[in-house]
Image (spheres, helix red, strand yellow):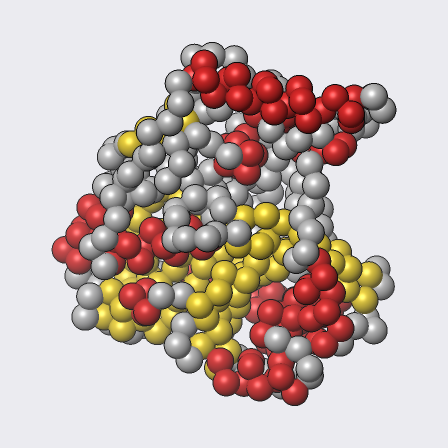
Amino acid sequence: MANRLTVVDEIFLRTHRGMGTPIALQGLWRTADRVHPELLRQLHSALRVGPLGRRVVRPSVPGARRYWRANDRAYPLVIAPRPLRPEELWEWADAQGFDLDPEFGPGWRLAAARLADKGSLISLTCSHALADGRGLVIAVDQALRGRGGTEVVATQSDWADARRQWATVLGGTAKALRSGVPKRPKGSLSGDVRRAIGPLPSAVLQIPAADWELTAAARGGTPNSLFVQVVSHMLWDSGFRSPDIAASLPVDTRAESRVDNDMAMTEITVTRADTTASIREKCRAAYEYRMSSPGGLPEEILQVLPDRLAYALSRGAGERDILCSNIGVLPASLSRLGPHRCTGVAARAIHPGLTVLPRTRLSAYLSRTAHTYTLALVSLDPERIDSHAALRDLATATLTAFDLPSAAW
């Protein structure tokens, strides 16, 4: 993996300091029977020496990018002391995202709990600064297959990196600066009303892959365009009144399997008149471009400015009415934990310590195993969706309207 942090890495790093929406990624596995602690300890040990085992180090030269250093210090494996009742599942899962620190402390955590139905629930959380959703999947796949270590590529000295960064920024901004430096957004950075926000409603639903793909094909679309359409209708069904919905779409830009933030963002606008087929065309066109850097300036400017100014220039980047993150097909290795077959595998993002609601009202994450699509949902609109049960029922009703059978966790 590259030694220096990217612009996206640093955006997510700033969220840990209260500049933006805090984000931790989470993988969840459900098994029909109890997983032995020794198997979990083996997985924990493999993750500790894998690509998640690293931390951020500040450079010694102004303008140089932060860099990664291997770090085998980890939070101990956490096993809940008693079985979880169904109504406790999401509070327990959300709690695993707190205290992750990719700079000064461990940036990931492995935890497990017994379930009242005799099964197990396993959670792996990591700071979004360490990896995106696909990166987390790759890290788990490598750990389960006994492959992959923390290999950080040697790189330039801080002085050489600083010279490169400043040359890129100064050269790339010369034309843009003729029109003036982009103005600071109106209002101070402390102008948001900060308050304690209770647990965010969550839901996970499993849909047979054959039904999802047949429905998409019958409507002239793809599994991805059906995903965007279904989530848009969930938001409208919750009471969202605007006839247009802005959808943020992460795009995986990997050329090879790497555990990092190798992604870009694009967006489309969904209307009530849109079909699965028309959304397919909108997505296809949107993937040809990416959300641009602030004011047409080179994105590297966000890495040479002080953190608070960089945050002001990139504030709200990627946030739209809904987020539709299609993580894709999961490796076969994630469908088992040793001898235990997984009855469900889900990937999502959570927001530990959230004090300001972002623009995003509904976040959705789609992944596929061999025969199942899994839709993980997190609501950030407590006025319209006020409980886990409300989100589950809303999602079930919308899926039913699309003739999609589902089973909720």
The x, y position of residue 346, in whole percent, is 43, 63
* Vertical arrangement, residue 390 with respect to residue 276, above or below: above
Q: Residue at x 74, y 65 (%)?
A: 282
The x, y position of residue 342, in whole percent, is 31, 71
Would residue 121 be found to the left or right of residue 67 on screen?
left
- Quadrant for the N terminus, please: top left
The x, y position of residue 85, in whole percent, is 38, 64
Q: Front-most of 156 and 377?
A: 156
The x, y position of residue 93, in whole percent, is 42, 53
- Quadrant for the C terminus, please: bottom left
Would residue 38 be found to the left or right of residue 332 on screen?
left
* Vertical arrangement, residue 85 with respect to residue 295, above or below: below
Q: Residue at x 51, y 17 (%)?
A: 162
Q: Front-most of 111 and 349?
A: 349
Would residue 251 be found to the left or right of residue 61 on screen?
right
All told, the count of numbered labels is 0
Q: Residue at x 78, y 25 (%)?
A: 175
